[in-house]
Amino acid sequence: MNLATYARRNLFRRRGRTILTVLAVAVAVLIFSAIRTVGVTFNAAADDAMSDRLATRHKVSITMQLPRRYIDEVRAIPGVTGATAANWFGAKDPKERIPFFAGFAADDKWFDVFDDMKVDPAQLAEWKTTPSGVILGDILAKTFGVKPGDRLTITSDIYPGDWEFKVVGIYMPQRRTVDRNSLILHWEYLNNDPRAELTKDQIGWVMTRIGGGVKSADMSRTIDKIFDERDDQTVTMSERAFNLSFIGAFAAVLTAFDLVSIVILLIMMLILANTIAMSVRERTNEYGVLRAIGFPPRHIVGFILAESLLVAFVGGLVGIGLVQVLINMGIGPFIEANMASMFPYFRTPPSVMLTALGLALALGLLAGVLPARGASRLRVTDALRRTD
């Protein structure tokens, strides 16, 4: 008889209790993985940011505008391979088919800098020659039920009235974190409209691509130095830092989520510890017999810990299966289709599932320590007299 055999045979002596404990561990692993998935996918835009793409905004705040001429000066800097500028349009759906989506008024170099938003060349050429033309993400186009050639009316929370556009193209993501729920219109079209008088000849931010031999930190300093003596000073950062600046507002929420996930695992450990303690109490007499026939205390400890680990392992595997089915094949695609602005990609990565399984095993080991320690210290005569 070895540890694995003994633990396996003991696993279903109390079948109902063991099944409930395994399910408790599985649910804990599922909840832990779901919470961690929110954090991982929320940070995915920063983690997957392009290393050769920089963002330049007003030094005071991104809500403040920069002069339009800044984009031309950035393009003239040696080492810059491309640059584009944009304004936040504040797009809204007048029929409320979608609660929120990103609208950018960009210049015609947008899709050169953001080449991970793939557009058919013919559609891109038409967009560049159609002042009222817009290009939509594939999910946004599906939500609106439009295709190239259709008319689309949207509103804005910045610029008053209805805005009517012609859909000339649909972009497809080339990376998992690309927002598939955005609308790209012409900066010139917005700039020439009387309703945009307050932001005329101004841009919100600049996105820059740099050559492979140029360090992003050096280029950031170069860009900011050019405008250091201007009325409108700039701050330039990597795309990762730029994305993190938006995520920072949710840092407290993500921290709270992490704490909740830890609490869930601790509850799982208590449930498992209670189950193992009950099993040990019921088999005290049996352990006394094992001691009487020559098994040393360390074997008793090994039997109990192996059983606790086995329950945790089976529960962890069931939990990972639930994660794969419920999140990666169910909730994930639904969120990607309906909440693409916040979660363009929502899947539990293997690293999170392996972490959940590893923590389940570690907590399973801890859950069995006290019962195992108590059983190994029982005197043989006391254990043999116990019948409950």
Image (tube, helix red, strand yellow):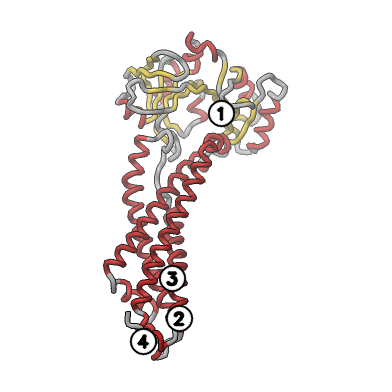
The answer to whether 62 is drawn above or below residue 131 in the figure is below
Q: Judging from the image, what secondary structure is the residue with disc 2 in? A: helix
Q: Nearer the viewer, residue 67 or 83?
A: 67
The residue to which callout 2 is attached is 376
The residue to which callout 3 is attached is 368
Query: In x, y percent, where is residue 175?
Result: 44, 39
Q: What residue type is disc 2 on?
A: Ser
Marked residue nearer the N-terminal end (1 or 2): 1
Question: In 3D space, how far apart are the residues under numbered discs 1 and 4 (Cα atoms)?
Answer: 79 Å
Marked residue nearer the N-terminal end (1 or 4): 1
| Left or right of 113, for residue 223 | right
* Residue 351 visible from this viewpoint: no
Instruction: Give the label, 4 or 3, closer to the camera.
Output: 4
Quarter placement of the C terminus: bottom left
Which of the labelled discs sits on residue 207, or is there none? 1
Q: What residue type is disc 4 on?
A: Arg
Which of the labelled discs sits on residue 344, or is there none? none
- The crowding category of the residue bearing disc 4, from other C-alpha atoms within 10 Å (few below 14, some 14 to 19, many at least 20), is few
- The crowding category of the residue bearing disc 1, from other C-alpha atoms within 10 Å (few below 14, some 14 to 19, many at least 20), is many
